[in-house]
Amino acid sequence: QKEVEQDPGPLSVPEGAIVSLNCTYSNSAFQYFMWYRQYSRKGPELLMYTYSSGNKEDGRFTAQVDKSSKYISLFIRDSQPSDSATYLCAMSVGYGGSQGNLIFGKGTKLSVKP
Amino acid sequence: EAGVTQSPTHLIKTRGQQATLRCSPISGHTSVYWYQQALGLGLQFLLWYDEGEERNRGNFPPRFSGRQFPNYSSELNVNALELEDSALYLCASSLNNLREQYFGPGTRLTVT
């Protein structure tokens, strides 16, 4: 079983739709959870990060973490064509004395059609 | 504030050669991370440098190495290049905090 599983898609939605992106993980030691957006041939851009379980909202984006189910989600409201990109989930073990690296899902390719 | 910068943008090498990739972190960031993004494999952690020291490395052979300079910039060296080393190499930096890593645009390495 891979440490982080993410459906690669592609996911195609009409403009204005609510998008739900998800990842599951197996390592219960993960405490920090992030979502990155990557446009074609560009570096990943940090969208959201959350610590432990709960919700976090930033504009049209909401990140949810359910540690009991080892499941994280990113919701995009009122999706726009400019949201078309690959979305990567990433997670890490606690800060301090740990490995330092992020473990990434393989990414979900999203296309928002006008 | 300038973001993470990487050079060169593209690099073409032949099998067996050596490649050197460079990264400048965001000002004030002391940690630099290197990742490989190969087609179909996702981002794989390569190396982590903090305060000039290698803190951790991923599951890559020793021909992948690097260093961090006193100004916190970093370089990644790949010796004895193989065809499967062709990938986008991404550098990230963080402010002595592994949670928020900010990525550069990457260097696309092609090995022929």
Image: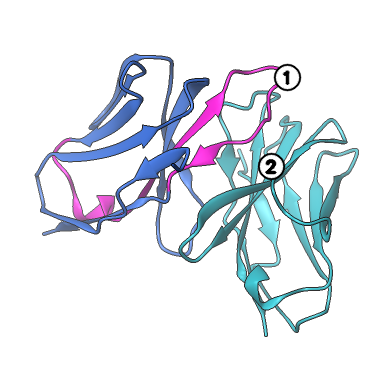
Chain colours: A blue, B cyan
Which of these two is toward me, A55 or A15? A55
Which of these two is toward me, B16 or B67? B16
Residue drawn at 48 percent across, 48 percent down:
A44
Residue drawn at 67 percent across, 78 percent down:
B83
Q: Quadrant of residue A52?
A: top left
Q: Separation of disc 1 and disc 2 at Cα?
A: 15 Å
Please give the residue where the numbered disc 2 appears in the rendered image.
B33
Q: Quadrant of residue B53?
A: top right
Q: Please state the total of marks drawn on the protein image.
A: 2
Please, what is the three-letter code of the amino acid marked with disc 2? Answer: Tyr
Please give the residue where the numbered disc 1 appears in the rendered image.
A97
- As drawn, which residue projects farthest toward the front? A1
Q: Is residue A88 magenta?
A: yes
Classify B86 as above or below B95.
below
Q: Is residue B54 left or right of residue A26?
A: right
Classify A110 as above or below B93.
below
Q: Nearer the viewer, mark 1 or mark 2?
A: 1
Q: Residues within 10 Å of mark 1 (few under 14, many from 20)?
A: few
Tell me the chain of label 1.
A
Q: Is residue A17 left or right of residue B11?
A: left
Residue A35 place in picture, x, y as percent: 40, 36
Residue drawn at 46 percent across, 43 percent down:
A2
Q: Quadrant of residue B111?
A: bottom right
Q: Which mark is residue A43?
A: none
Q: Which residues are magenta?
A: A77-105
Residue drawn at 68 percent across, 23 percent down:
A98
Residue A59 place in picture, x, y as percent: 26, 28
Residue A31 place in picture, x, y as percent: 49, 19
Classify A77 as above or below B39.
above
Residue B62 place in picture, x, y as percent: 83, 55
